[in-house]
Image: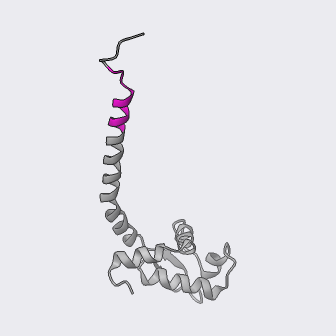
């Protein structure tokens, strides 16, 4: 099982249901019942997803009377973004080289004679 924070975060984000839950929480706090609405699964199944997200530090749960609203915790997402930044730079450099190559291909050949 993953032990470093980045691995925990990426593992939690690997599931589309958990990404959907995070997308919903990015708009504000929600209860388990509210988070379960768009999914065809039991509250227990949604709770399991929430435990994974909580274990990865991506959400926290408050206590308000009998409610335990969930809220997003963005710090682990910032760590993922920082890790991806190096790959974004690599991708951009690759695209820049492709742009240069394509521009070179589109230039007329100075050695060719016009017809």
State the image coordinates of residue 27 (x, y, percent, origin top left): 54, 65
Vertically, is 53 above or below 88? Answer: below
Q: How many marks overall?
A: 0
Residue at figure coordinates x 29%, y 58% from the top left? 86
Camera sees residue 61: no
For residue 108: magenta?
yes
Residue 63 in view here: yes
54 magenta-colored = no
Most extreme residue toward the right is 40
Residue shown at the point (58%, 74%) measured from the top left: 17
Give residue 37's quadrant in the image: bottom right
Most frequent secondary structure within the magenta stretch: helix
Residue farthest toward the top in the current orientation of the protein: 115
Relative to 9, residue 94 above or below? above
Residue 17, placed above or below residue 83:
below
Screen quadrant of the N terminus: bottom left
Residue 46 percent coordinates (x, y) = 60, 82
Q: Left or right: where does residue 8 sit relative to residue 51?
A: left
Where residue 44 appears, x then y in whole percent? 62, 88
The residue lying at 57 percent from left, 88 percent from top is 65
Q: Between residue 28 and residue 78, name the one nearer to us.
A: 78
The image quarter in which residue 95 lies: top left
Visual colour scheme: one colour
* Residue 57 spot, x, y in % from top left: 41, 79
The quarter of the rendered structure image containing the C terminus is: top left
Q: Pick whichever, 40 or 1, lies toward us.
A: 1
Magenta-highlighted residues? 99-109
């Amino acid at each position: 099982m993953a032990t470093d924070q980045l691995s925990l975060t990426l593992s939690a984000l690997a599931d589309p249901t958990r990404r959907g839950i995070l997308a919903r929480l990015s708009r504000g706090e929600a209860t388990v019942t509210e988070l379960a609405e768009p999914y065809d699964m039991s509250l227990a199944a949604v709770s399991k997803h929430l435990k994974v997200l909580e274990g990865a530090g991506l959400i926290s749960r408050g206590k308000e009377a009998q409610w335990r609203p969930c809220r997003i915790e963005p710090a682990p997402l910032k760590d993922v973004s920082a890790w991806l930044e190096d790959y974004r730079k690599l991708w951009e450099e690759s695209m820049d080289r492709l742009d240069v190559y394509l521009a070179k291909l589109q230039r007329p050949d100075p050695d060719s004679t016009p017809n």
